[in-house]
Structure formats: C-alpha cells, structure tokens
Image: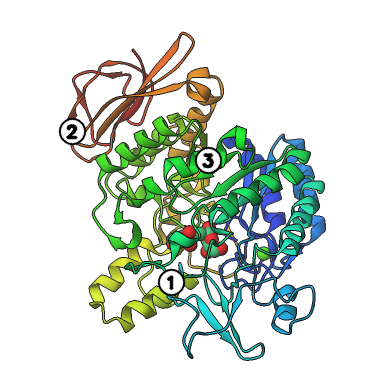
Amino acid sequence: MSFCDSNGDGIGDIPGIISKLDYIKELGVDAIWLSPVYLSPNEDNGYDISDYYSINPEYGTMEDMDRLIAEADKKSLKIIMDLVINHTSDKHEWFQKSRQKVEPYTDFYVWKKGKNGKKPNNWGSFFGEDCWEYDALREEYYLHLFAKSQPDLNYRNENVISAVEDVMRFWLSRGVAGFRCDVINIIYKDSYENGRIRPALTGFEHYISTEGTHRILNRFNRNVFSKFNAFTVGETVFVTPKMADDLVNPERCELDTVFAFEHMETDCFKIKWFLRKFSPDRFFSTLTKWQNELYWNTVYFENHDQPRSVSRFGNDEKYHKRSAKALATLLLTLRGTAFIYEGQEIGMTNFDFTDITELRDVESKNIWALSGKLRFPKFLRWKMIKEKSRDNARTPMQWDDSGGAGFTNAVAWLGINSNYKTINVKIQESDPDSVLSYYKELLILRKHSGALNSGSFKEIYRKNAVYAYERQYKNERLTIIINLSSKKKKSPIIGKTIISSTGNKEISSHLAPYEAAILIT
Ligand code: TEU
Ligand code: CA
C-alpha cells in the first residue's frame, strides 16, 4: 500500500488512509476503492488472498477497517473493496485442504491429471508463465491463470459459489458500499480443451465472458448485490463493447459497470508487452467507440496495473503540468463513472528506477526472466519493463518534500520517485494553478453540470491528435476540445472557455501544445 504510512514501517496502511480522509474529501470524489487489504502473503500485492475474513496486519486491524468505514461515512465517502475471487493464495486454507482432498474442499480448485506426463492443456498465464503447476502432494496439476501462488477457484462447484457469497455478505454487512470485482469475466471456464495457439494467452477463448460467468453474476446479483444495494464495477479483460454491454445491461442484473481495456491498448498490440508508439488518434477513436456503443462507461486512465498517464499519454517533462491537466479534462468530461488513481491528481510520473532489482512486482520479475530466457535483446527487455512495469504507478504517494515524501518516516517498501521534491501535494495545495487545483475545479464543475454528469456524448472532431466532442443535457450544451500533442494545432472550433489547461480564456484560431478546454459554444 502506497498511500500513507501511519506507523513508520514503510508500508501504507488503513490508519494512514483515515488520516487523509479530509484530503480525499476536498478533492471532490464520492468513494474510495481500496486495493485488497485482506490477509495475504502479498506475492501479488494482495491479489493473492489467504483469508477473506481478516485484514493484513501490515495494513491494520479489523477495528481500523471498521473505523475507516465509519469515518468515511461521516464525510459521505463510500468504501469500495476489491473482491478477488477468480483465485486465492496457495496459502489459503481452502487450497491447503484441497491439496489433501479434505472435504468439502477437494474440488474447490481446478485439478487435472497431466496428459502423458505433460501439462493438462496448452494454455498460457497472464504473467508470462505456464498456467499449470504440479502439486506433489495431490499428484495432480492445478490451474493458475496468474502467478503460481494464485490457484484458480473452480466455479463449477456450488460450494465455491456459496462460499464466495458469504464473503461478500460479510463485508457488505460491515458497511462497505460495493466491490471492484477482479478479473470477473474469466471466473467460469467453458472447457479445458487446448486453445488456439497465439503469441500470448493461448486458451482465452475458453474463459472470456462465458455463459457460465453470466449465470453466476446474475446469481450474485440476485442473492447478494441487490439485497445490499451494492455498487459493482467488474474488471473485465479483453471485453468488446458487446461483451461489456451484456455484463452491465440492467435488464440482465449482473454488474453495474465494468473496466474495459481497449483504450489502454493504444500503445501496444493487444498484449501490453508488444509495444507500439502511442497514437492519440487511436486513443480517441477507441474512446468514441466505447462512448457510443456502451450505454454507461467507466472512464479511467490509471490504476495500480497501468503506467502513469502523464508519462504514457502526455509529456512528463516540458509539458508536465499542462498535459496532466489536459488528460484530467478528458477524464472528467467523458460520459461515465470516472476513477482517479492516487497521485494522478498531482500528475505523478512513472517510477524512475535504474535497476531491475528496484522492482517488487511479480509480473515484472516474471517477464524480465522470460524475456531473458527467450533471448530478447537487452535494450528491448529494458524498454518493455521501463514502459510497462506495474511498479511505475505503485511508488509511494508524494505528499511533501520531506525525506520519505511525507509518505513515511522509514524506508518505503518501494522506491520513492526522486521528483517528489517538485511534484507533491503540499506545493500543489497552495498553488491555484497546480494540477491538483485543476482536478478540484473540474470535479466541482462536473458535480454541478447535468451535461457532464449524464448528458449525451457526440464526437465532433478527431484528427492529428486533436479531439472534440459535445456533452448535452436538456438545454445545457458543452463542447470539450483537447490537443494531445506537443505541437501547436489549428483549432476546429472557437469559443470562450469555462476552464482550460493553459489558463486561456478563449480558444480562437489555434490550440497550444496540450491545450484542453471546456467551452460554451
Ligand atoms: O488484473 C488483471 C489483469 O488482467 C492484469 O493481470 C493485467 O493483465 C496486468 O496487470 C497487466 O499488467 C487484476 C489486478 O488488477 C492485478 O493487480 C492482479 O495482479 C491480477 O488481477 C490478478 O489478481
Ligand atoms: Ca505502516
């Protein structure tokens, strides 16, 4: 956890979050999504849960969690928990009992005999390893679509489904408002046949958004979500707008919203490691497609898995402030529920690590090893990791310019970006022209605007890194324009600005580099 360390062990924690609730409230958001805080050996940053009913002592206690929920509630902030149910940690009691065939856990996971001394099928894992691990005790292989310490649960087993429902009820009864459901569109595997060979993730056609998954989500909704009026956002990998629509269509009663990935694939060929140059036009056309095809979207440019947006889609040097503001304008004026990742609101940049040993992420370590084994050229391996490591966004929050960046007074669990002296909350809070102040202003505007909140979306221009669209609700119509490049561009529209990344009060014939604005036209 990288938000705030309250007890000087270098690790962010729940009391740390409580101490910053005023900051979060003043930013102007309505809810906080916590990455997993459950008991976990933390081999994948808490996404490997060993007990769904307790809090990781590194992060605090159950009392701290209750206090967080209560204190947040006093400020009308909701708490959304991460629900990681595709897999557990291999340290989870369910798995340990499953290995030993103790009932009712025998079939809690996906166990298979090998085929003629080989793995059960040819599928690949998300983290660049094989996805079958042999267990010498049970003398069978188990499936793990992520790290080998993350065995997949078996959703053909009724007992698994009801055990997970119990977990959800437990937390909703404690007062959390809902869940961000980790890789929720892959929980039910249609078959365990070999997959079509691909450069990565062979086998995925057997588990992406299957009918079985829809059935289970509908059941979760009827049995649990609807009973607690819970909000759900599913993290859904490789979804098309049609698949996403099937998950969020209110008539089907499954999820409220989903995180799609297609706009995050505009600087790669489908798989993040197959790099290609970021194309603003591809980014914009993907956004338009999703805005048009899905009746309600989530909008996000960052999270704990993605590099920092200002480094990736903007310019984190010469136009740091302006491009961070331009991206903020886009984020908060598209139609949908917007998510801001800690530090994005001050324009935090990618981690400036200079050696692979500075990284903690299991995925980065695996890919580094794999690309070495495959004899990728050194420069390419480094470029891949440098651009795409998840640790880019996991460095500690930069609160001030003191030793531990105000995050900790000890050595932080992951390196602090050396730009914390110039990019931090303290400086930006007292500067009306800062990225942080801009986020706050935009969030206020958004709160008071029907057009931004729920108005229609209409693209009006997209070419050469310039994008413009209209949002309209009743007789309120706003036009948003953005130049996502470091070049001056001819503007397709003119008008007075309500807010702009450059501070310009008017857009006339041209757009400055990274100029973005909301206009009344
Ligand atoms: O991520 C799922 C997911 O698809 C990622 O593995 C994604 O492909 C990867 O991060 C790209 O680098 C979720 C969580 O957000 C992630 O942190 C977990 O590691 C993963 O599930 C396993 O639980
Ligand atoms: Ca701590």
Do we see residue 403 in this rendering? no
Q: Amino acid at mark 1?
A: Asn
Q: Nearer the viewer, residue 419 or 85?
A: 85
Which residue position holds label 1?
194
**SS category of the residue bearing label 3:** helix
476 lies left or right of 151? left
Point out residue 268 in the picture as x, y percentages from the top left corner: 30, 56
Foreground mark, 3 or 2, reads 3
Inter-mark Cα distance, 2 to 1: 52 Å
User: Taking the image as drawn, is residue 95 in sight?
Assistant: yes
Q: Quadrant of residue 501?
A: top left
Q: Are marks 3 and 2 in contact (CB under 8 Å)?
A: no
SS for callout 1: loop
Instruction: Determine whether 406 is above or below 103 in the image.
Output: above
Q: Percent x, y for residue 327?
A: 38, 39
Which label belongs to residue 246?
3
**CA distance separating discs 3 and 2:** 42 Å
The amino acid at mark 2 is Lys
- Under circle 2, the secondary element is loop
Above/below status of 410 relative to 234: below
At horizontal 57% and vertical 83% (from top left) the residue drawn is 113
Q: CA distance from mark 3 to mark 1?
A: 26 Å
